[in-house]
Amino acid sequence: MTTPTVTPQFVKPKALNCPNCGAPVELRGFAHTLNVVCPNCHSILDASTPEFTILQTFQRKERIEPQIPLGTRGKFNGQPYQVIGFQVREVDSEGSSYSWDEYLLFNPYYGFRYLTEYEGHWNFVRVLSALPVELNTMGKPAVEFQGRRYRHFDSLSARTNYILGEFPWQVRVGDVVQDRDFVSPPYMLSAEATPGEITWSLGEYTSGKQIWAAFQLPGSPPAYYGVFPNQPSPYEGKPAAFWSAWLWLNVALLAIALFFTMSSADREVFQNTYLFTQGAKTEAAFVTPDFELTGRPSNVEISIRTDLNNNWAYFNFALINEDTGQDFDFGREVSYYRDSDGAEGKPNDSVIVPRVPSGRYYLRVEPEMEPRILQSMSYSLTIRRDVPSNAFFWIAGVLLLIPPVFITFRASAFESARWRESDYAPAVKSGSGGGGDDD
C-alpha cells in the first residue's frame, strides 16, 4: 500500500480584536504564539489567554515598515514559510549604535526559522537543539559544531527597540540579551543569553537576490555595504590556486629556458685585444677584420673587457654586413673608480644585438675617454654568435608573479575588512561598515 504524499498547507489564521484600539489582530502561529503586536496601535498583547491583554503600549513616534511585509510566504530549501513577526535590534559599540532587522518565519509542520538583515546582508537562521563544543584554544576563543570550527567574532549586548507581528516567546521593547557570535563563513553560530537560559542558533549567509526570489518580492534587493562577519569571501581558495598555477608555469618556463640554452650555439666568431691612448695622433676609430655569422638569424653578443682605473670610456659600435651594407649601430659606456670608500662602476660590459642575419660582417669601433686625463686603456673585444639570453624569461617570471600577488592582496584585504569590526580589530574600529551583530 502506497502512503500518499501530504503537501504542507497553511491553516487560515485566527482573528481577534485588540483591547486597546479594537482593530482586528490575526494569529498565524496559533498555539505557539505568546505575544502579538496590534498592527494598528502597535500595542504588545498577551496571546496566551483566550482574551488579549495589553502588555506594553507603543511609545515610538515613527513606524518602521519591514522590507518583507508580514504575512508574505516564501520557500527555503523547498519548504514553505510565512513571515509572522518582525523586530529591530540594536547594539552600542564604540559610542555608536548599529541596528539590524529580524524576521520570524513559521510553518506549522517545520516550526520556526529566522531571517536577519544588516545593510543588505542576509542570514537564514535556525535554532539549534544540539550544543556546540567550546574549544580550548590560544588566541581567539572557538567552538566546534558538526565537525566545523567557528572562531569568536564579538560579544555584545543586543536590545530590542521595535516589534511587529507575533512571537512564540514573551518579547518587549527594551529587552536585552547578551550575544556572542562565532564565524566560519558562510555560517555563523550565535549564543543569546538571558537570565537562566542560553539559546544557540546557526545562520547561513544568503544573498538578497535569493531572499527576493524566495518571497517573489517586486523590484531588486537593496545593495549591500561593507563585509559581513560570515560573508563568504569571493577569493576563497583562489590564492592557493593562483600560486599553484604560478609554480607550474614557472616549471614550464624553466624547461623552455633550458631548452633554448641547450639549443643555442654560443659560438665565438671574433676576439682581439687593443690599446687606446687618449690624445694619440692616430685615428681612434677602426674596423675589425671580417668574420662569418652562419646559421639562422639569431643574436650577436659583443663583450668589452678593459683595465680602466679611475676613468671612463665610451665605445661607439657599428656591426656592418660586408655584402649588403646593412648596419646595426649601438654604444656602451664603461667606468671604474676606486677610493677610500670603495669601488664604483664596472670596467667590463656587453651588449646583445638581436636577430642578425647570416653573412660576412665587420665591426666598426670608435673609443673615447676623459680628454683631461692622459691615460692608456687596454681592452679586448669578443664577439659570439647565438648566445643564450635569459632576460625574456626573467621578465616573464616577474610578470607571472602579478596575478597571484594581486589575488593574495585582495583576499587579505577582504579578510581584514571582515575582522575590522570584531573584538579583535588590529586598530580602532571605524564608525561604519559591518558592526553588525546578527543572530
Image: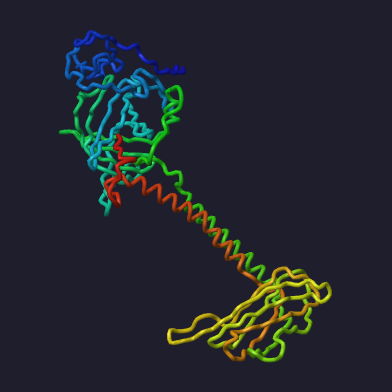
Residue, x 19% and y 21% (percent of image)? Answer: 59
Q: In the image, is residue 322 above or below residue 50?
A: below
Q: Is residue 147 visible?
A: no
Residue, x 53% and y 59% (percent of image)? Answer: 247
Looking at the picture, tell me which residue is in the foreground, 438 or 142. Answer: 438
Q: In the image, is residue 392 above or below residue 338?
A: above
Task: Determine the residue located farthest toward the right in the rendered image.
Answer: 323
Q: Where residue 19 sits: x, y (%)? A: 19, 10
Q: Where residue 195 sits: x, y (%)? A: 15, 33
Is 16 displayed left or right of 330 in the figure? Answer: left
Which of the 4 image quarters holds residue 156?
top left
Q: Is residue 234 visible?
A: yes
Which of the 4 image quarters holds residue 190?
top left
Is 296 displayed left or right of 424 in the figure? Answer: right
Q: Where residue 169 sits: x, y (%)? A: 22, 24
Looking at the picture, tell me which residue is in the foreground, 227 or 153. Answer: 227
Q: In the image, is residue 25 above or below residue 88?
A: above
Quarter of the image containing the C terminus?
Answer: top left
Q: In the image, is residue 231 above or below residue 363?
A: above
Is 176 displayed left or right of 73 in the figure? Answer: left
Q: Where residue 51 sits: x, y (%)? A: 19, 10
Name the colouring of the figure: rainbow
Q: Across the whole image, how many numbered discs are drawn on residues?
A: 0
Residue, x 46% and y 49% (percent of image)? Answer: 237
